[in-house]
Image (cartoon, grey):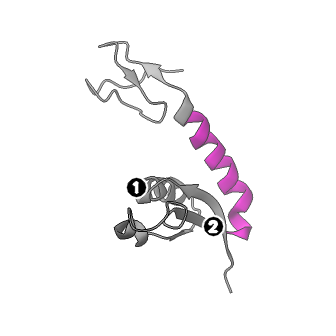
């Protein structure tokens, strides 16, 4: 029997789905809880409608490392060398001109 453990409490379903895809790309199966609560936004307290991403215990350490990389990249902004636009660290391409991020 599989045991799912909460890895991350996402701000919304979009963020949870992004992380689910990222972890899926490295072979980690995930489960999202609370994905159908978004319709209750405004009616219920925010902590009740939060979305959580869960993983199996066997994948816990790999998932935590991937999550740590994701969180670190979220904080690092970069400036596009083509147009000068500031982009979130998670973007590989400039949102304004679609130029690829320069090698780090």
Q: Name the N-terminal-most of marks 1 and 2.
A: 1
- Camera-nearest residue between 25 and 95: 95
76 or 23, which is in the foreground?
A: 76
> Residue 97: image x %, image y %?
25, 23
Residue drawn at x 56%, y 64% as measured from the top left:
52
Q: Quadrant of residue 7?
A: bottom right
Q: Would residue 99 be found to the left or right of residue 55 on screen?
A: left
* Relative height, residue 20 to residue 40 (above, below): above
Where disc 1 sits, the SS reads helix
Measured from the top left, where is residue 23 in percent x and y?
A: 55, 56
- The image quarter containing residue 56 is bottom right
Kind of element beneath mark 2: strand
Q: Quadrant of the C terminus?
A: top right
Q: CA distance from mark 1 to mark 2?
A: 17 Å
Q: Looking at the image, how many numbered discs can be counted on the residues? A: 2
On the image, numbered disc 2 is attached to which residue?
55
Instruction: Give me the residue at 49% from left, 53% from top.
Output: 11
Residue 40 in percent (x, y) is at 38, 69
Residues drawn in magenta: 56-73
Furthest-bottom residue in view?
A: 1
Quarter of the rendering containing residue 53: bottom right
Mark 2 Cα within 10 Å, few/some/many (few <14, many 20+)? many
Asked if labels 2 and 1 touch by Cβ distance under 8 angstroms, the answer is no
| Residue beneath disc 1 | 14
User: Residue 36: where, in percent of width, then height?
Assistant: 40, 73
- The numbered disc on residue 1 is none
Residue 58 covered by magenta stretch: yes
Residue found 69% across the figure and 52% down from its top = 64
Q: Would you say residue 76 sits in the magenta stretch?
A: no
């Amino acid at each position: 029997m599989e045991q799912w453990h909460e890895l991350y409490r996402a701000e919304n379903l979009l963020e949870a789905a992004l992380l689910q895809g990222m972890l899926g790309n490295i072979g980690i199966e995930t489960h999202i809880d609370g994905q159908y609560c978004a319709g209750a936004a405004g009616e219920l307290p925010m902590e009740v409608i939060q979305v959580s991403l869960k993983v199996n215990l066997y994948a816990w350490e790999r998932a935590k490392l991937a999550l740590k990389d994701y969180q670190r990249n979220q904080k690092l902004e970069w400036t596009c060398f083509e147009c000068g636009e500031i982009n979130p660290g998670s973007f590989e391409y400039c949102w304004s001109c679609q130029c690829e991020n320069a090698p780090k």
